[in-house]
Amino acid sequence: MGTARLLSIHVHPVKAFRGLSPREAVVEPWGLAGDRRWALIDDGGKVVTQRQQPRLAQAAAELLPGGGVRLSAPGHEPLAVSVPQPVSTLTLEIFRDKVEGVPADASAHRWCSAFLGADVRLVHLDDPAVRRPVDPEFALPGETVGLADGYPLLLTTTASLDALNDLVARGPHAAEGPLPMDRFRANVVVEGTEAWAEDGWSRVAIGDSVFRVAKPCGRCVVTTTDQRTTRRGKEPLFTLGRHRRLDGRLVFGQNLVPLTLGTLRVGDPVRVLG
């Protein structure tokens, strides 16, 4: 681990949209600053992701000063959306969690609905410090998360992706590989480790920030979605099902919870503390 370092950082301002790759990012208790504070919901209040709408991979959201976002997508004029005032909230459902969010301006709902060809609304998580706790089965008291699937950060390693791609290359769907890292929508990507080394980590330091490793990340159909074309295939779920099954879940990467805050920078050393 002496040569391990932070290769890249990824922030997704709107859940399921294409991510940004900044050179640095502030670590907040509930995740990287600006990461997954916005999401789309359907007319029943359920959060819409690439599971239901793979085309979301072609939409982008740029962070604006003050926490707003600038939405863009092929064939649509960009739209700047300000953080809405929390004068009222609505209940959104993200997996089993019920969370209060603040609806954006009606123009944002129209833009997103026109892009998807479906009735959706854009909502903002105004206060992640109180809105949504981490899964109590894997949380410490007081830990919260934004609108990520379940945990503040997701870590992957290039060595494990290389090992996975080697397995894909030897399987019946070799033509689908090698898979790029963007299939896994991580927040932090680490290089310089052994393959699958992260399976044995319990605490890790990246630069000056320390993180608790909560659990491996269970993977879903989103990983089979080409983030550029939105086409879906069999991999990596087929190969993960053969080689990376844990407690009934297909796993790749590790979920992290911050223990100490700070700023992550590309190139930061990565140290395993336990």
Image: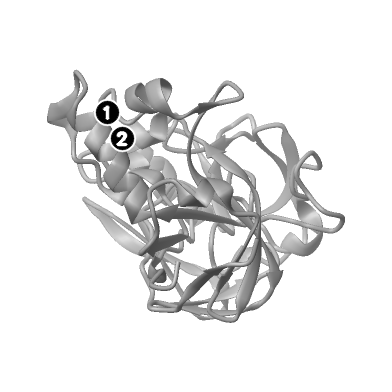
Determine the image quadrant of residue 118: top left
Q: Label 1, on which residue?
A: 232
- Dots 2, 1 in contact, CB < 8 A: yes
Residue 160 percent coordinates (x, y): 36, 47
Q: Residue tagged by mark 2?
A: 225
Compared with 91, 205 (above or below) is: below
Residue 203 against residue 64 in the figure, above or below: above
Question: Which numbered tag is attached to residue 108?
Answer: none
Q: Is residue 187 left or right of residue 73?
A: right
Q: Amino acid at mark 2?
A: Thr
Mark 1: which amino acid?
Arg
Which type of secondary structure does the marked residue at label 2 adopt?
loop
In the displayed image of the protein, which residue is found farthest to the left?
175
Q: On screen, 265 above or below 197?
A: below
Identify the residue shown where x is 28% and y is 60%: 77
Mark 2 nearby-residue class (10 Å; few <14, some 14–19, many ≥20): many
Give residue 110's position: percent from left, percent from top: 45, 47
Say which residue appears at 55% left-offset and 34% top-offset: 42
